[in-house]
Image (cartoon, rainbow, N blue to C red):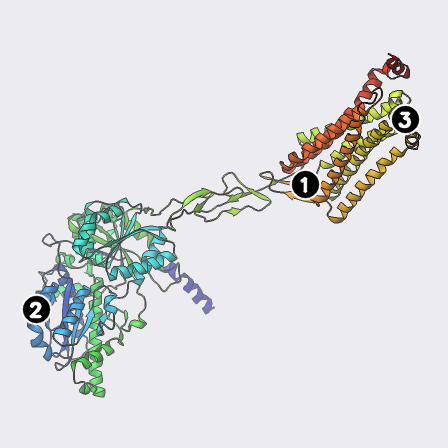
């Protein structure tokens, strides 16, 4: 039971976090006397543990040496951190931390001249125990500061320096061969890239722009971002790499601006060091009022918050930062040093001030409609504390890491007396560094700090929305977080309520390369297009797509077909040549009428069997031919109605045999006519053939061969019931499959051979005396028969489905009617309507004339 409860909680933790994201809000002010250019990003702090007692007056005097906003921000964090360590009895007891030399924050040229003056006089006396030790410097935020300090002190002064950096993680400084005694407090930005891509995917964006500094730091972030974007099919609309060199930047500035202005993306990611030309580029974008959703990282936190208005965007600026806890007592510490100078309004110009979001809601429904005058007074009354920026928190952890390192140093000295064997600065620095990189501790706010780079885990990230009101008042709201330790797809947690309150809108601008392909369409790519860009094409025939942006449409099953919109499949109607259909009813009626007419003709011939016109052309063969024609007409009915196995077999076999009988009967009649007129001379053999009835054997002989062909057909591959789901859209046609196509065409070929034989013989007898001579009629009947079936083949193969069956029925009826009409209709006409011509006297009188 406990296991089930644990499993349930584990699965639902992301949902719980998403629902209970602790709302965090901050405010900040921009003082009018502040200059836009702040040179406080290059800072060096000389860390030292001393037995002297450091009081509040010392910190106040120390803080007064910092003149710029950024330098004061870092100095506040350093002083607070050292004071907290100094008041901790369990860490470096009876000792205090301080910034020994006070380099402060300067430009790089200023550092060089300042170090030459002071470092030789103070460095030999520096030690964790005020004796021999190596120098421990805390530098930031520019990586060049650390590189310059390390090079200067190592090469020019001959001293080893242990460097701790609090600026953004830089790949150049991670080179252990070039910087063997340097440790970067800031984590890598891999988790930031993951968080940004997850955020992009959450809003279903796939087309984003990127503006980065053209340096190692920017290129590394680009590699992190590109790797995740390729995995998740997100594309760059452009990658705008801003040169570090001012001359190169100015030569390509217009190209960079036009690239952003003309791009179709609505989302632009900005990453880079704010001290470089990329800051100028961002200010130019602000001036041009380019409407975009801007995504930045913590380096741009201050820059974006100190504008009269944020980049003129529909949704302000979104900032992704490594998670930093709220540290209590910071504001109280600073204001205790000088309550008058360090008022809330002043501190708000240095750092973000923490307040309760929920308390502000009654005063401002959204951040968009807050009155800055009324809100400022309220904020100063409801401020909880002063927050730490990312770099300030790195300083906080660096101070504690140094304190724990010195604590371990002293422990090893007291217990193991190892320090006595260290007789040079280099040995001491490497030993200090070895202790430092293996230190792990829990800081006062509860964060676990592991200084072992190999064991460091990816940092969690917080997502903030920054909105600037008038008169320099900025609001910063936490709208979500990202935890890389949750399962994929559950790492991003956003507060919909906080987003709506912060942005003042429920809608977020789309940012896609191509509009969605709706149901009934599929995506396709042209050569040279990005993977996120595509065009929409309707699904091919009988294929559907019921989702958005599908790569391939789905073929409907054989028994179904696509609706006109091609969004779903519909069951096909089962059809066949039924008697209810008008065409089929007409064919059946024609077949029955011809059958009835043939029966009438047969009855008339039987009734007048003694008349010359019936007797003249072998009345037995005439009867036999009429009966076979009746079966020819009737066999067409086998093609109508729902097919089954019996009817499928009977269709082709009956058709082949009865037509063979009919055609062979015509052949026998033709031969009889020829033989009859050849007996006018003394040809006894001809007379014997005629009298002996040899022509009558033609019918069974010819029919027997057709029966053999049909038997082979049935034995090898007989006809069977089949379905045709392709010929007619939306219908499944039940048809009879011929089985062996070769056998079918062999039967038709044999019929054609018989018909051509009969036609040839009849044609040769066409000039014989025509009184009661049906040679011409037989010739025309076979001509009609051959024309019908010769035209049958191309028409049959050009049609599909039920039309194909109807063509076969029509050919059967046409050829049968042709034989009936050409052979028997003239005789029927004479017998019924001109009986006076049906006598031997009339024949003799006509011959005499």
Mark 2 residue crowding within 10 angstroms, few (<14) / some (14–19) / many (20+): few
Label 2 secondary element: helix
Picture layout, residue 729 above or below residue 303: above
Q: Residue at x 33, y 57 (%)?
A: 226
Q: State the separation of the CA atoms marked 2 and 1.
A: 101 Å
Q: Classify residue 606 as left or right of residue 90.
A: right
Label 1 secondary element: strand
User: Can you name the residue that lies furthest to the front here?
Assistant: 682
Q: Position of residue 344 (x, y in %)?
A: 14, 58
The answer, for residue 618, to whether it is visible in the render is no
Mark earlier in primary sequence (2, 1):
2
Quarter the C terminus occupies: top right
Mark earlier in primary sequence (2, 3):
2
Q: Classify residue 368 as left or right of residue 794.
A: left
Mark 1 residue crowding within 10 angstroms, few (<14) / some (14–19) / many (20+): many
Q: In this rendering, which labeled residue sits more in front, label 2 or label 3? A: 3
Q: Position of residue 793 (x, y in %)?
A: 67, 35
Q: In this rendering, which labeled residue sits more in front, label 3 or label 1? A: 3
Residue 687 occupies quadrant: top right
Q: Position of residue 12 (x, y in %)?
A: 41, 61
Q: State the separation of the CA atoms marked 2 and 3.
A: 145 Å
Q: Nearer the viewer, residue 485 or 151?
A: 151
Q: Position of residue 435 (x, y in %)?
A: 24, 78
The residue where tag 3 is placed is 679
The residue where tag 2 is placed is 114
Q: Which mark is residue 115?
A: none
Q: Residue at x 7, y 68 (%)?
A: 113
Mark 3 residue crowding within 10 angstroms, few (<14) / some (14–19) / many (20+): some
Mark earlier in primary sequence (3, 1):
3
Q: State the separation of the CA atoms marked 3 and 1.
A: 52 Å
Q: Residue at x 85, y 21 (%)?
A: 772
The residue where tag 1 is placed is 735
């Amino acid at each position: 039971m406990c296991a089930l409860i644990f499993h349930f909680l584990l699965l639902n933790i992301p949902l719980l976090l998403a629902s209970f994201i602790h709302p965090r809000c901050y405010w900040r002010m921009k003082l009018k006397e502040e200059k836009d250019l702040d040179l406080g990003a290059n800072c060096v702090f000389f860390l030292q543990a001393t037995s002297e007692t450091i009081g509040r007056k010392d910190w106040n005097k120390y803080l007064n040496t910092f003149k710029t906003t950024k330098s004061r921000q870092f100095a506040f964090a350093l002083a607070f951190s050292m004071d907290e360590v100094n008041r901790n009895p369990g860490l470096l007891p009876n000792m205090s931390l301080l910034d020994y030399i006070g380099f402060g924050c300067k430009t790089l040229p200023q550092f060089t001249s300042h170090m030459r003056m002071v470092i030789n006089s103070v460095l030999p006396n520096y030690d964790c125990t005020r004796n021999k030790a190596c120098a421990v410097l805390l530098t930031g935020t520019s990586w060049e500061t650390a590189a310059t300090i390390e090079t200067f002190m190592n090469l020019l002064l001959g001293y080893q320096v242990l460097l701790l950096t609090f600026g953004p993680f830089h790949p150049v400084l991670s080179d252990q061969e070039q910087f063997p005694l340097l440790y970067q407090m800031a984590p890598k930005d891999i988790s930031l890239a993951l968080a940004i891509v997850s955020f992009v995917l959450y809003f279903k964006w796939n087309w984003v722009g990127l503006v980065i500094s053209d340096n190692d730091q920017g290129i590394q972030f680009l590699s992190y971002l590109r790797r995740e974007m390729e995995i998740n099919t997100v594309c760059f609309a452009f990658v705008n790499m801003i040169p570090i060199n001012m001359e190169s930047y100015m030569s390509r500035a217009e190209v960079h601006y036009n690239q952003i202005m003309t791009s179709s993306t609505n989302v632009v990611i900005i990453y880079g060091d704010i001290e470089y030309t990329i800051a100028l580029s961002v200010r130019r974008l602000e001036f041009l009022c380019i409407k975009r959703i801007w995504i930045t990282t913590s380096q741009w936190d201050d820059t974006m918050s100190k504008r009269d208005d944020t980049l003129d965007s529909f949704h302000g600026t979104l900032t992704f930062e490594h998670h930093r806890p709220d540290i209590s007592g910071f504001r109280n510490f600073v204001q205790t040093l000088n309550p008058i100078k360090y008022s809330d309004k002043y501190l708000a110009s240095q750092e973000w001030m923490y307040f309760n979001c929920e308390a502000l809601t009654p005063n401002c429904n959204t951040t968009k409609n807050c009155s800055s005058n009324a809100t400022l007074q309220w904020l100063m009354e409801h401020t909880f504390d002063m927050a730490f920026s990312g770099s300030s928190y790195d300083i906080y952890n660096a101070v504690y890491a140094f304190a724990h390192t010195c604590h371990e140093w002293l422990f090893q000295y007291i217990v193991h007396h190892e320090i006595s064997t260290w007789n040079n600065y280099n040995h001491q620095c490497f030993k200090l560094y070895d202790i430092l990189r293996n230190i792990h501790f829990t800081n006062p706010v509860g964060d676990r700090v592991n200084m072992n780079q190999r064991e460091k885990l990816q940092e969690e990230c917080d997502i903030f929305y920054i909105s600037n009101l008038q008169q320099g008042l900025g609001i910063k709201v936490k709208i979500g977080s990202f935890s890389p330790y949750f399962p994929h797809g559950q790492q991003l947690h956003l507060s919909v309520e906080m987003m709506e309150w912060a942005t003042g809108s429920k809608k977020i601008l789309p940012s896609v390369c191509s509009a969605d392909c709706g149901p009934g369409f599929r995506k396709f790519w042209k050569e040279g297009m990005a993977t996120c860009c595509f065009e929409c094409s309707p699904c091919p025939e009988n294929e559907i797509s019921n989702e958005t942006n599908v790569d391939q449409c789905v073929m409907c099953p054989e028994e179904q077909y696509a609706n006109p919109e091609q969004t779903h499949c519909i069951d096909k109607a089962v059809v066949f040549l039924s008697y209810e259909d008008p065409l089929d009813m007409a064919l059946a009626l024609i077949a029955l009428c011809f059958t009835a007419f043939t029966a009438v003709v047969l009855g008339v011939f039987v009734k007048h069997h003694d008349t010359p016109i019936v007797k003249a052309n072998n009345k037995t063969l005439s009867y036999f031919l009429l009966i076979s024609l009746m079966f020819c007409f009737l066999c067409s009915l086998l093609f109508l109605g729902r097919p089954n196995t019996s009817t499928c077999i009977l269709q082709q076999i009956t058709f082949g045999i009865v037509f063979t009988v009919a055609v062979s009967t015509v052949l026998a009649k033709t031969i009889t006519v020829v033989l009859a007129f050849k007996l006018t001379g003394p040809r006894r053999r001809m007379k014997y053939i005629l009298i002996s009835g040899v022509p009558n054997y033609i019918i069974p002989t010819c029919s027997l061969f057709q029966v053999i062909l049909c038997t082979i057909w049935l034995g090898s591959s007989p006809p069977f019931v089949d379905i045709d789901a392709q010929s007619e859209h939306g219908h499944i046609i039940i048809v009879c499959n011929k089985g062996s196509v070769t056998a079918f065409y062999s039967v038709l070929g044999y019929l054609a051979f018989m018909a051509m034989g009969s036609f040839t013989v009849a044609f040769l007898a066409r000039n014989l005396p025509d009184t009661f001579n049906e040679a011409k009629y037989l010739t025309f009947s076979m001509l009609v028969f051959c024309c019908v079936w010769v035209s049958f083949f191309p028409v049959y193969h050009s049609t599909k489905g039920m039309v194909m069956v109807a063509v076969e029925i029509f050919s059967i009826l046409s050829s049968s009617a042709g034989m009936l009409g050409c052979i028997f209709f003239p005789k029927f006409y004479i017998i019924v309507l001109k009986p006076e011509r049906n006598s031997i006297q009339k024949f003799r009188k006509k011959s005499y004339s």
